Amino acid sequence: MSRLADAPSSSSSTKPSESHNALDIDKILNREASAFQREVEVERILKAFKLKCVLMFRKYHFHTDL
């Protein structure tokens, strides 16, 4: 057999590579989206915690009912 017959054609070798690249890009984007969602959730929890601390501080130091 000749080497040309054994080598994959350029069109068939690029399609799996493009498909693989698309899957890699999707994985990266999903990771970024998940990381962003975690960051948003952490910020939300921290804001709620800070608000609770402020309200408790006011209640105990200024003797107000909230």
Image: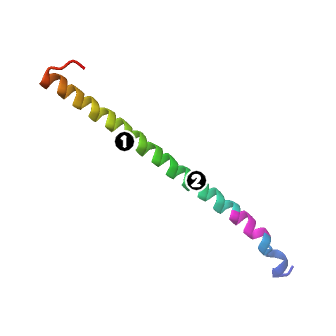
Magenta residues? Answer: 12-18
Asked which quadrant contains residue 48, the reply is top left
Q: Is residue 6 left or right of residue 48?
A: right
Amino acid carrying mark 1 in the image: Glu
Marks 2,1: beta carbons within 8 A: no
* Residue 17 shown in magenta: yes
- Indicate the quadrant containing the C terminus: top left, top right, bottom left or bottom right: top left
Is 54 on the left or on the right of 4, as rendered? left
| Residue 26 higher or lower than 11, as above or below | above
| Mark 2 crowdedness (10 Å alpha carbons): few <14, some 14-19, many ≥20 | few
Residue drawn where x is 87% and y is 79% of the image: 1
Residue 10 location (% of width, % of height)? 77, 74
The picture quadrant where one finds residue 45 is top left
Q: Which mark is residue 27?
A: 2
Q: In x, y percent, where is residue 6? A: 82, 75
Tell whether 24 sits left or right of 49. Answer: right
Q: Is 7 in front, or is 32? A: 32
| Residue 31 or residue 65, whichever sits in front | 65
Circle 1 is placed at which residue position? 43
Specify few, some or many for label 1: CA neighbours under 10 Å numbering under 14, 14-19, or 20 or more. few
- The outermost residue toward the left is 61
Q: Residue furthest right?
A: 1
Give percent across and percent down for residue 12. Answer: 79, 68
Instruction: Give the color scheme: rainbow, by chain, secondary structure or one colour.
Output: rainbow
Q: CA distance from mark 2 to mark 1?
A: 24 Å
Amino acid on which disc 2 is placed: Lys
Q: Per the image, is 36 magenta?
A: no
Secondary structure of the residue carrying numbered label 1 = helix
Residue under the point 46% across and 48% down: 35
Q: Residue 3 placed where, x, y %? A: 81, 81
The secondary element bearing badge 2 is classed as helix
